[in-house]
Image: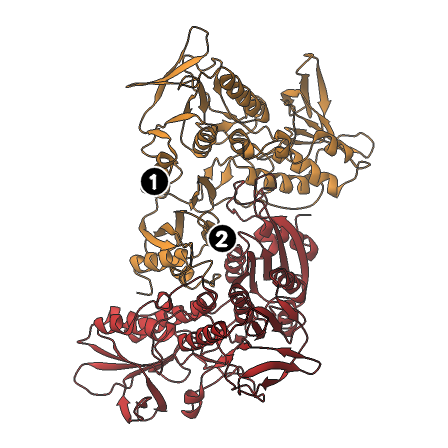
Chain colours: A red, B orange
């Protein structure tokens, strides 16, 4: 039953958050229902809509020259399609029983209530900002929004202007070595900085098992990055000018003219929590398969503020990623527009690169599998990106986890040069389909000498995994 | 029931054909059973074992410098693992009731019978050599074996030696525009030839629908190849020296100093036919799922001499491809060695390239689907290889066929630059799993700006196909 508020025949859809999930939902709903049927209001507290947060490291590093290239669709473009985008307007309360949201103009402070028939919560994520002394000092930057990226670039420009040709002014510390940390380290190297990455984990890229993360460390060191692993930041020191001067751990201090925080994000669900909406163990909103907030017929949520079902472990996980946010928005907009669509879940695919090293993962790491109560076999193989005799063939390492007894594929990690990253899609589809390693050995994958050895590296791993599970071809 | 011939406790496995399927079978059987248990004899009529026929165009074109780089394992290496490889020895008869084969030494003509307990037929394919006047003239070449490749290179060297700096001696005609024809055209361009491709079809690369093949034609023309489509070769003309001089069609004559035949291959099954073994409509041997010749407990067949089940159309097809041959050999060797493995079938994946244009297909073309009695929707989308704002993003075209009503994926064709070819693997796995276009829209594929737009091109096609089938998200 939809609680439809009488307002003639025209319903109002309110969207909180104007980025990937929110604007995809608004756009898709608009595609299905015209402005005569559905009014769409989007509240966005920032200056931008529909931007690519994933692109920020490449903008900072100079690969992408203009900020506006990261904006898929401007507020004006959305407005031209009858989506009422209200920038610099922050929703401060959701009144679920009353079917309305309170919004505040960030510049004037003026507040007002807006009723809704249907509500989409797409409040995204906030970067983890550890409660450390000095963390708010000038020169310490997150890289979550375009405003963050611009602020960092402004700092870099200021440092460049006062550079004296020595190390002073050219020292950057990146805290965290996940995707953002690794990408930001490379971006700062490109900008000519001496970069130190302080990482809590055993190896960078903790989304990989450490044996695969080691290859990422070597690539980073090859770029000239100083990797400090197994180190927890305890304080950020400031200079006489109040600006950041160093990053401190238990054991050491690392001089820093600029600090980038890349220690991940948490779901931005304070509003939802205050409204009594259901949150999961990771702090994200819980939804049903149609991306409806559980127990609420007319409220949907998607993007970086929700938890998603992991189809491999069958547990809820928090996987903030633009590609999911776009899919959520598409599903939400379809349902809110009167159609039907579902988001079945994720398998945990992610790809990245350091210099020309491509890094990919999907499914469960060893520790994920153990945590899910699964027993498994592990294999790691070395192969090449092309037929060995074809010019440019480069090494590729594939690690595969398969469940004991059933042989079901549980996860794949790939590190290599060209063609390594997107090869993980083979495993992503196989995981979705619930294939076993043995079934994978027969996959009819594309083969030609410029693109693959006659046994694709993923098949080589599958053969070995199938054999190890004891159900294999050999 | 295995008809085991008494010869102490040691059985003899005879393999006919020492290339991909045959040598994979021999090697895998050897892995499972030592020489004390199983004698393995391989008859090969050529000079080589385990070579990559797929690599020949790159050798002719100069990308691969040495012939021996195409040999995965030499006869000596196989012999070191107790596989008795007999080169230049052609099997001339299979006596199925008697459990023996007759082999002839190609050089001496001496013949003898060899009994077997288990037999593997891996006789491969022979190039189609049309019955045309002049087809056997010097200067007309197939490119199926290393010997063929060497003969062609010898011709090219001879032409180079007598080149006078003019067009004379630099004119090549390639007959056929399938994978081999297209790859050979590029190889000859690289060698400095004026290349004309005479093609019976409407567009080159008839393994694609013509609308996609058109992009291949443009790339070939961009390379400087003269494409003549819709033309059937009727004769090959020779000069006063008896060597090839031109290729003739109904309407025209194309001067040629060298001619390459790339009009496909047929299963080499004359031996099997004479022995009364079952052949399918395409002339290939018919096997069961364990790659056993149907009705014969102790005879297996694999590689380019068998037909395979197409998992999409559910019909037997002939798909000569090294990657299948290797899988067949692996399955056969496992079964012949006392283990268990099956080859479930293919979905028809193939990838290739022309210059930097990557070409991929899997599943059914429009005409295949119609022939299989399927009704379907077709969509074609344009997207990019990377996020649009990321440097080096290049266009990619994806065509998708999905069944009416069920929405089941039927086929995908992709043409683009970097990352186009192996992206087809996503669809290959989805076809194997029997996914619908709608299910594909939710696939958790790798996303990062250097590798993909936020919606992977394959997902964009799936969304559009799902919508068109009428079961989609929008």
At 38% across and 68% down in the image, what residue appears?
A67
The residue at the far front in this view is A164
Where is mark 2, residue-wise? Answer: B429
How crowded pointer 2 is (Cα within 10 Å; few <14, some 14-19, many 20+) is rated as many
Residue B362, placed above or below residue A297? above
Q: Quadrant of residue A23?
A: bottom left
At 40% across and 77% down in the image, what residue appears?
A147
User: Residue B218: x percent and y percent?
Assistant: 34, 38
Q: Secondary structure beneath disc 1?
A: helix
Tags 2 and 1 both on a single chain: yes
User: Residue B229: x percent and y percent?
Assistant: 32, 29
At 48% across and 85% down in the image, what residue appears?
A279
Where is mark 1, residue-wise? Answer: B367
What is the distance, in whole Å, between disc 2 and disc 1 at their CAs?
A: 22 Å
Q: Quadrant of residue B353?
A: top left
> Quadrant of the image for the C terminus of chain B?
bottom left
């Amino acid at each position: 039953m939809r609680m439809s508020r009488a307002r003639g025949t025209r319903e109002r859809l309110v969207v909180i958050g104007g980025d990937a999930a929110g604007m995809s939902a608004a756009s898709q709903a608009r595609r299905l229902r015209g402005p005569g049927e559905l009014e769409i209001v989007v509240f966005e507290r920032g200056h931008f809509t529909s931007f690519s947060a994933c692109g920020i490291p490449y903008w900072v590093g100079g690969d992408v020259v203009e900020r506006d290239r990261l904006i898929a669709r401007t507020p004006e473009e959305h407005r031209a399609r009858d989506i009422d985008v209200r920038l610099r307007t922050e929703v401060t309360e959701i009144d679920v029983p009353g079917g309305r949201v309170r919004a505040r103009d960030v510049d004037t402070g003026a507040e007002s209530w807006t009723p809704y028939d249907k509500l989409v919560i797409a409040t995204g994520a906030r970067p983890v900002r550890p409660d450390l002394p000095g963390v708010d000092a000038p020169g310490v930057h997150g890289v979550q929004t375009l405003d963050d990226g611009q602020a960092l670039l402004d700092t870099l420009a200021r440092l460049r202007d006062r550079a004296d040709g020595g190390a002073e002014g050219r020292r950057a510390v990146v805290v965290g070595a996940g995707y953002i940390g690794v990408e930001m380290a490379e971006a700062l190297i490109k900008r000519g900085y001496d970069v130190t990455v302080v990482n809590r984990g055993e190896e960078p890229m903790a989304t990989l098992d450490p044996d695969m993360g080691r290859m990422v460390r070597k690539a980073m060191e090859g770029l000239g990055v100083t990797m400090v692993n197994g180190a927890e930041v305890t304080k950020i020191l400031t200079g006489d000018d109040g600006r950041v001067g160093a990053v401190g751990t238990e054991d050491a201090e690392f001089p820093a003219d600029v600090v980038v925080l890349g220690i991940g994000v948490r779901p931005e669900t304070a509003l939802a929590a205050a409204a009594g909406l259901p949150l999961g163990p990771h702090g994200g909103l819980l939804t049903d398969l149609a991306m409806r907030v559980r127990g609420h017929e007319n409220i949907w949520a998607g993007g970086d503020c929700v938890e998603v079902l992991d189809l491999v472990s069958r547990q809820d996980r928090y996987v903030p990623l633009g590609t999911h946010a776009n899919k959520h928005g598409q599903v939400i907009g379809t349902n809110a527009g009167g159609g039907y669509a579902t988001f079945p879940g994720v398998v945990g695919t992610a790809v990245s690169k350091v210099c020309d090293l491509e890094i990919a993962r999907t499914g469960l790491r060893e520790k994920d599998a153990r945590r899910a109560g699964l027993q498994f076999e592990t294999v790691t193989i070395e192969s090449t990106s092309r037929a060995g005799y074809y010019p440019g063939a480069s090494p590729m390492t594939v690690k595969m986890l398969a469940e004991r007894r059933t042989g079901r594929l549980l996860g794949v990690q790939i590190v290599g040069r060209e063609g390594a990253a997107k090869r993980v899609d083979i495993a992503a589809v196989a995981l979705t389909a619930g294939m076993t390693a043995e079934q994978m050995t027969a996959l009819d994958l594309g083969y030609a000498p410029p693109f693959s050895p006659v046994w694709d590296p993923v098949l080589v791993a599958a053969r070995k995994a199938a054999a190890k599970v004891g159900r294999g071809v050999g």
